[in-house]
Amino acid sequence: MIDDIENDKIGIVLCKDLSRLGRNNAMVAYYTEIFFPQNDIRFIALNDNIDTLYGENEIMGFKSIINEYYARDISKKIRSSFKVRAQKGEFTGTYAPYGYLRDPENKHKLIVDEHAATHVKKMFALAAQGVPAKTIAGIMTNDGILIPRAYSHQRTGKWKNMFNADLPTLWNKGCVQNILKNRVYMGHMVGGKQSVKSFKVKKLENVPQENWITVCNTHKAIINEDEFWHVQKLASVKRPTNIRKGENVFVGKLRCSSCGRNLAYQNSQGRHKHGSFCCNRYRRSSKLCTSHYIGYHILYDAILNDIRRLAEICGQSEEDFKAYVKQLCDDKNDAGESHNKKELEKARSRSAELDIIIKRLFEQNALGVIPDDRFAILFGDYTAEQNGLQSAINALKSQLDKQNPDDENMEMFYGLIKKFTDIEKLTTGVISELIDHIVIYDSDGGTPRRQKVDIFYRHKV
């Protein structure tokens, strides 16, 4: 294409062919049929045998259309070839992800870069302990670790202008988050994450995650799947910054036994020295759920004592520990199965009732029996209740489908507990590493107050 034609005084425009004149047929038509004649400019296209000095060329309009369709077809074929490569699990990126290198024998395959992989493992290990991405970035910066582009430049000599040469070790939160979210570290190749609308619009757009092309086990993994998805779960938790007098170590870990929603932390008030938790839906409306209230220090002591008890048994004998955990799982399954089945049936029944209620609500609104403002309020309440029930149904089904830990998971759990034989206090890192979630039940209403708490440790225990 000839740039800035309108800004320069040009007597003759010479190009190889019509396709060099503009990006699309409309642009070519504008120049050849309007702009050039109005400005007495002679246009010459060598390959197309066009010279406006000798009169108009009737075939020029058709050729410009053909050129556009040719470009469209080439673009379609290129995108199709990239899609085929993605479906085959081949790497098609410009540069290998941090922690990997292109295989010298096959540029579409990845091999582990052992030096960078140690830093990737360190980032995931910190994230698995509940350390935020911003803090991890600060740790990497303080340790003097080169950022991915600077490291690539040091190794290959490329990407010189793609980073600040004065601050090659300055990590940021976004860079760490991108690494922690990348499934390539599990040994899977994910393609088709970005695309262009057409060959005329070169701007890349993100493709919905459900349309990504994922091919598993295409290269050696740096991070195992359990740790990767554990990090994703922790990253999705919103961490409040207004906790007074200390840290809420249970953030994102507490579930309501009735509706499946998270429990919210409440600061201490009046003469009470400690905060407490209650169901998030109950906070919105007491009609949606019950409180499931539990004091922070009561839960803290209960969890710490349970971990200490497991660690004590773990220190005695590996066989005794595994036998104890297996018996614990059997007892939990027997005691909870009947209760969970009743709760599941109750939740499904109520959800079916709500389907009928919402349908009638729409009918009455359409007939003018219920005004729009009243309809909006009722519809919002019923929809919120149904969404909460669906969460509870999913949680109950998951618990019913849960099986005893297999030998591999038992080994992993044993190794995990063994690390905490001398535990003195709970931290966010300890809770994140040990526990998947905690289910809080309502108290029995008696005196002294008794309340059931189910602790679901990682590795299906």
Image (cartoon, rainbow, N blue to C red):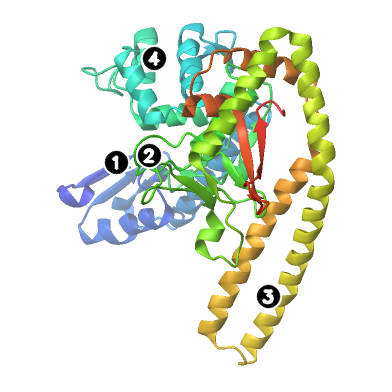
Q: Nearer the viewer, mark 1 or mark 4?
A: 4
Could you tell me which secondary element the residue under label 4 belongs to? helix
Inter-mark Cα distance, 3 to 4: 58 Å
Q: Disc 2 versus disc 4: distance between alpha carbons?
A: 44 Å
Q: Is residue 127 left or right of residue 416?
A: left
Task: Specify whether 449 is left or right of 179.
Answer: right
Q: Of helix, strand and loop, which one carries label 3? A: helix
Binning the other alpha carbons within 10 Å of mark 1 as few (below 14), some (14 to 19) or many (20 upward) gives: some
Name the residue tied to disc 3: 358
Q: Is 57 situated above or below 243?
A: below
Q: Between marks 3 and 1, how big is the CA–CA gap? A: 69 Å
Task: Kindly identify the residue that appears in the image at 61 percent across and 37 percent down.
Answer: 437
Q: In terms of sequence position, does the residue under pointer 2 or pointer 4 come before the other?
A: 2
Q: Can I make out residue 379 in this image?
A: yes
Look at mark 1 in the image and give the residue it sits on. Answer: 14
Disc 4: which residue: 152
Residue type, numbered disc 4: Ser
Disc 2 to disc 3, how far (Cα)? 70 Å
Say what amino acid the circle numbered 3 marks.
Ile
Residue with the mark numbered 2: 46
Q: Are marks 1 and 2 in contact (CB under 8 Å)?
A: yes
Q: Is residue 317 left or right of residue 135?
A: right
Residue type at numbered disc 1: Leu
Of the image marks 1 and 2, the number of the one nearer the N terminus? 1
Vertical order, 72 against 151 (above or below): below
Mark 2 or mark 3, earlier in chain: 2
The structure residue drawn at horizontal position 56% and vertical position 24%, both measured from the top left corner, is 433
Q: Nearer the viewer, residue 226 or 272?
A: 272
Of residues 66 and 7, the one drawn nearer to the viewer in this rendering: 7
